[in-house]
Amino acid sequence: MPDFEEYTEEIKELWESHWLTNMGKKHKQLESGLLEYLNTPDITLFANGHLALECVIAAFNLTGEVITTPFTFASTTHAIVRNGLEPVFCDVNPNDYTMDMKKLESLITDKTCAIIPVHVYGNICNVKEIERIAKKHNLKVIYDAAHAFGVTVDGIGVANFGDASMFSFHATKVFNTIEGGAVTFKNSNLRKTLNDIKNFGITGPESVEYVGGNAKMNEFQAAMGICNLRHVDGEIGKRKAVVERYVERLSNINGIKLSKSQIGVKSNYAYFPVVFDGYKLSRDEVLEKLKAEDIFARKYFYPLTNSFECYKGRFDVEKTPVAKYIAERVLTLPLYAELALEDVDRICDIILKYNKARNECNLEVAAALARG
Ligand SMILES: *Cc1c(COP(=O)(O)O)cnc(C)c1O
């Protein structure tokens, strides 16, 4: 959060203008700030990331099947299903947990209309290969970039890949507007459609062309974003120090697998996922040991979206064995800018206390599953 005074200063003029929502001055200011920060051709803001994703899928007017990943937050899959589309789940690779390029193309049928991959934990998908496959089969690509705010690949902002990308500005994300989200896109014709869809499909004073919803970002959210954007680079810098300490403490421990940093990728240090595979303690045991000390790690992501109760009987989790394997063993450790390095040490001490005998690493199993 920004300083209280900084925020109240930012919202003061709302008491003069009485303009609280519907694309006001703060909204416009944040939009142009983000356009520059994300270095993207175009952007439009939303009430939250999930509605941003639902609206951009709707804007492409798709029908049929969408290839996506189950190793994500509920939002990705739900946004596809709530648009009347059929998700087809591609497995993830065991290195960075993004969509497995060796398995993607075989899932394409004549019903496939789009690919919705996830830059999970801020790890960037194989965007070149996805683009190649999408071009070849004439498919739209919409990235769930909820985790990837500010990440660049060889200097290119992540918002520039695919036909569109969705970002989340939820309170728990690297950059927040309390709740909020955005869609970045290349084709400028999309701007009007997205703006209409997020405003009830109203296209003119007396015309309603789409069955839209209400997904507008209000001025108080935008003001929070304006404040947070001023400090986001500093926040990411502090997160980097936390991650480096975790890496220093937890590297080269049998049974503990960390995410490798990707070549050419400038990270935002959004998450610190750790896979416990053949460690003295199971993932669930580590979670409990930490909880006993009032430290709250998360099983992120577990369960997989293709095993949710609401989809019971619809999908086969066994078709995404690597995602299943990782979901059963992964834990994201506490990570935020203000986390003191002494606390990182305390967390690592608790985990490493059990680093004694019995350690055979089973990651070969995950690699074998990936090979099929
Ligand atoms: C947070 C998140 C969303 C949804 O964003 P909200 O702003 O919370 O609606 C979607 N996908 C992923 C991967 C997320 O982490």
Image (spheres, rainbow, N blue to C red):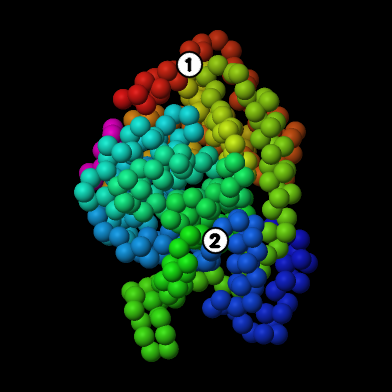
User: Within 10 angstroms of label 1, few (less than 14), some, or many (20 or more) residues?
Assistant: some
Task: Answer yes or no: is residue 224 visible.
Answer: no
- The location of residue 366, given as percent across then percent down, is 40, 23
- The location of residue 156, given as percent across then percent down, is 58, 47
Q: Residue furthest top?
A: 357
Per the image, label 2 sits on a secondary structure element best described as loop
**Which residue occupies the foreground of this view, 66 or 177?**
66
Label 2 belongs to which residue?
41
Which of labels 2 and 1 is toward the front? 2
Q: Tally the numbered discs.
A: 2
**The N terminus sits in image quarter:** bottom right
Magenta segment, which residues? Answer: 313-320
Q: Residue at x 67, y 25 (%)?
A: 249
User: Mark 2 or mark 1, which has the lower sequence index?
Assistant: 2
Label 1 belongs to which residue?
361
Task: Answer yes or no: is residue 35 visible.
Answer: yes
- The location of residue 64, given as percent across then percent down, is 24, 55
Q: Residue at x 42, y 85 (%)?
A: 204
**Which residue occupies the foreground of this view, 132 or 98?**
132
| In the rendered image, the vertical position of residue 9 relative to residue 369, given as above or below | below
**The C terminus sits in image quarter:** top left
Three-letter amino acid code at disc 1?
A: Cys
Three-letter amino acid code at disc 2?
A: Pro
Give the left or right position of residue 51, taking residue 148 as reference: left
